[in-house]
Amino acid sequence: MPADDDDLDELVDILKDQGYERVTLEQTLLGRTRILAHKDGGTREIIINARTGEVLRDVWIDAGGRSQPSEFADHSGKGRGGRDDDDGDDHGGGSDDKSGKGSSDDD
């Protein structure tokens, strides 16, 4: 199901209810929605596939630039958690190799 404006508005409201300030939405080069929400000196970054509504990335980035998974508020109690294995095209990190092997691993 595509992520529409109502879904994004609801997500922004949830983030604000959780105490996040300066919540911004932007479109990435790949057409994904990037949400940045600031709180307690850190930033929560959420990347959403606009066509499917899938959360591709949900991480907390502290003031030192370190990131860790963040629970995504989906009201089911089964949050996706921070998925840091996406293709990295939106934020300069990650890898296209989904196998979990490094480039120097031999089979």
Image: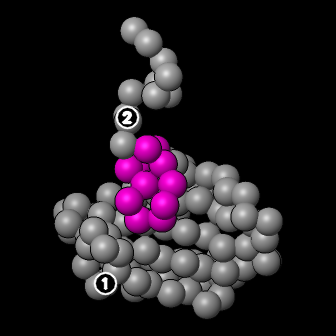
Identify which residue is drawn at 35% across, 75% down.
Answer: 28
Where residue 98 appears, as percent x and y from the top left, is 37, 34
The answer to whether one can see residue 83 in this image is no
Identify which residue is drawn at 66% across, 73% down.
Answer: 43
In the figure, is residue 91 to the left or right of 99?
A: right
Q: Residues within 10 Å of mark 1 (few under 14, many from 20)?
A: few
User: Is 90 covered by the magenta stretch?
Assistant: yes
Closest to the observer, 29 or 58: 29
Which image quarter holds the C terminus? top left
1 vs 2, front mark? 2
Which SS does the magenta portion mostly show? loop
Q: CA distance from mark 1 to mark 2?
A: 32 Å
Where residue 6 appears, as percent x and y from the top left, is 31, 84
Above or below 39: residue 65: above
Query: Where on the picture, by quarter, is residue 89?
Result: bottom left
Above or below 32: residue 74: above
Instruction: Tell me the magenta residue range.
Output: 85-95
Report the colour scheme. one colour
Closest to the observer, 50 or 91: 91
In the figure, is residue 58 to the left or right of 25?
A: right
**Looking at numbered disc 2 in the image, what kind of residue is underneath it?**
Lys
User: Is 4 covered by the magenta stretch?
Assistant: no
Which image quarter holds the N terminus? bottom left
**Looking at numbered disc 1 in the image, what kind of residue is underneath it?**
Asp
| Residue wearing tag 1 | 6
Above or below 28: residue 73: above
Kindly state the secondary structure of the residue where label 1 is placed.
Answer: helix
Closest to the observer, 89 or 59: 89
Where residue 40 appears, as percent x and y from the top left, is 79, 77
The answer to whether one can see residue 60 in this image is yes
| Residue wearing tag 2 | 98
